[in-house]
């Protein structure tokens, strides 16, 4: 699940003055070609779950790492829950130091060739883009990280602490592989996630900001179920499961979860407030000055770019009911999707839904959605410094904005075990180029060199 929607309202930062680019290190054409080759070859593996291509893709990546100097015994591929994981150890010089874990995922969302302009699993490089399923989510970062680790291995770089590359195999479905990897590496110093964070480029080609993902809302699906005896439709009475469910949903719609804040959202609001125009900008500045300003809260709550950053949200997304057109419904149910503010237990949200609908005959059930509760990660000074250094090497003075994403990534499993995790992808792209999970997914070829330089700085600074 990729991440250009770091905080929707941050698009307002496009109004900051144009930022000059640093004089970057001269790109290595051979290294660029290697990363591009890994990306195009990686797209050709149809790593959809269910399917059998994740282990094959993992073996391909293992071959690349071994060729660069990794010992075969330091790379492990394991079958897990109908998929597979890959773990590669880059040995450090101090065994007393906790390792740094890099996480990405090898699987992709399903794509039907009939719907695409190009076959989604036959990569095409065209007009400055790599097209194909996974071109961004998440084989771009997998290819970048593997290329950078291979380069560092060939050069003889020796980190102070172990660097562990872990690639999950079912991030887009039930995330069982990430659960295992988190258990395997629960003693890590930190996690660097290439499937989170990243930079925004304006439609005019100017850098806008870099989002450092340090938290994500808990994804949770609940089902509200109403059952009745039913009967013949010619004999309607006061009891009707569909009407009853409709009233329940109306009461849920009227309920608003309380406003919450944390270190990440406070920093994001503070960063965006000065440059956001119009009534939203006024509301942001008022909210930063006084988080209890109800007028400001109301304005921000009405803005889809900000409502998810203020509170837990729950919304009905699916309905079903009845069994025949000439019978009173015996069952009606609705799926309610919640994005829960970090630190709030999902069971507490379920109980809140029960209270909000105020229907003792209805059942509220948590679905098996693969997600778990996880706290936000602290904004560690060493992480902030390394990310700032990496970004400012390319774009001096560019705002570094902590972000809380509404989507879910593998980071949650590490955070739940007390391991801080940070979305630190090196990809900068335009919003209009983001087709993750959609048709004609593509990644800009000119983002490759900067992303590799970004990861090299992070590893050398944080794995000392």
Image (cartoon, helix red, strand yellow):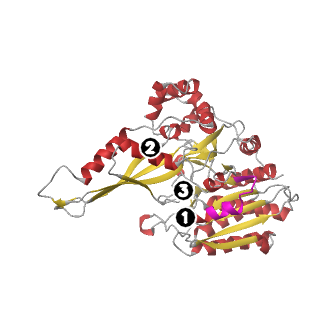
Q: Is residue 63 visible?
A: yes
Which of the marked residues, 2 or 3, is nearer the chain's N terminus? 2
Callout 1 touching callout 3 (CB < 8 Å): no
In the visual, does 23 lie left or right of 214?
right
Q: Is 126 inside the magenta-drawn segment?
A: no
Secondary structure category for the residue under label 3: loop
Secondary structure category for the residue under label 1: loop
The label nearer to you, 1 versus 3, is 3
Query: Which mark identifies residue 42?
Result: none
In the visual, does 252 lie left or right of 221?
left
Disc 1 packing (10 Å; few <14; some 14–19; many ≥20): many
User: Residue tagged by mark 3?
Assistant: 371
Name the residue furthest left: 234
The span from disc 1 to disc 2 (Cα, nearest Å) is 34 Å
User: How far across and how far down the image is residue 103, in percent?
Assistant: 67, 58
Callout 2 touching callout 3 (CB < 8 Å): no
In the visual, does 269 lie left or right of 382?
left
The span from disc 1 to disc 3 (Cα, nearest Å) is 17 Å
Callout 1 touching callout 2 (CB < 8 Å): no
User: Residue tagged by mark 1?
Assistant: 108
Which of the marked residues, 1 or 2, is nearer the chain's N terminus? 1
Disc 2 packing (10 Å; few <14; some 14–19; many ≥20): some
User: Residue tagged by mark 2?
Assistant: 352
Q: Nearer the viewer, residue 63 or 102?
A: 102
Q: Which residues are magenta?
A: 179-191
């Amino acid at each position: 699940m990729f991440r250009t929607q770091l905080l929707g309202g941050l698009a307002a930062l496009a109004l900051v003055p144009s930022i000059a680019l640093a004089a970057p290190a001269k790109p290595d054409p051979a290294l660029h070609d290697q990363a591009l080759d890994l990306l195009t070859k990686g797209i050709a593996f149809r790593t959809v779950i269910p399917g059998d291509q994740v282990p094959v893709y993992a073996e391909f990546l293992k071959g690349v790492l071994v060729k660069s100097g990794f010992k075969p015994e330091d790379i492990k591929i394991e079958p897990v829950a109908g998929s597979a994981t890959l773990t590669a150890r880059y040995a450090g010089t101090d065994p007393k130091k906790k390792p740094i874990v890099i996480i990405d995922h090898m699987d992709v969302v399903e794509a039907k060739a009939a719907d695409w302009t190009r076959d989604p699993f036959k990569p095409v490089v065209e007009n400055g883009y790599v097209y194909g399923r996974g071109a961004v989510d998440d084989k771009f970062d997998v290819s970048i990280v593997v290329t950078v680790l291979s380069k560092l291995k060939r050069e003889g770089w020796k980190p102070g602490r172990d660097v562990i590359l872990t690639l999950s195999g079912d991030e887009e479905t039930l995330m069982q592989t990430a659960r295992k990897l988190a258990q395997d590496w629960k003693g890590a110093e930190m996690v660097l996630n290439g499937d989170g964070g990243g930079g925004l480029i304006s439609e005019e080609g100017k850098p806008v900001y870099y989002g450092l993902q340090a938290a994500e809302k808990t994804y949770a699906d609940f089902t509200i179920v109403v059952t009745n005896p039913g009967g013949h439709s010619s004999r309607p009475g006061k009891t009707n499961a569909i009407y009853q469910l409709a009233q329940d949903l109306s009461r849920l719609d009227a309920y608003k979860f309380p406003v919450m804040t944390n270190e990440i959202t406070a920093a994001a609001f503070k960063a965006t407030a000065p440059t956001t125009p119009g009534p939203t900008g006024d509301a942001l500045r008022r909210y930063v000055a006084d988080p209890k300003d109800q007028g400001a809260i109301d304005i921000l709550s009405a803005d889809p770019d900000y409502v998810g950053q203020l509170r837990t949200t729950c919304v009905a997304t699916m309905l079903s009911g009845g069994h025949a057109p000439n019978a009173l419904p015996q069952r009606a149910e609705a799926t309610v999707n919640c994005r829960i503010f970090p630190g709030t237990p999902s069971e507490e949200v379920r109980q809140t839904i029960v209270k909000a609908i105020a229907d003792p005959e209805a059942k509220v059930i948590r679905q098996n959605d693969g997600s778990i509760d996880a706290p936000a990660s602290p904004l560690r000074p060493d992480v902030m410094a390394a990310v700032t250094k990496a970004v400012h090497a390319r774009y001096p003075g560019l705002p570094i904005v902590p972000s809380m994403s509404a989507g879910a990534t593998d980071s949650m499993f590490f955070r739940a075990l007390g391991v801080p995790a940070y979305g630190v992808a090196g990809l900068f792209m335009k919003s209009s180029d983001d087709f993750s999970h959609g048709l004609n997914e593509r990644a800009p070829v000119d983002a490759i060199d900067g992303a590799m330089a970004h990861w090299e700085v992070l590893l050398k600074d944080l794995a000392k």
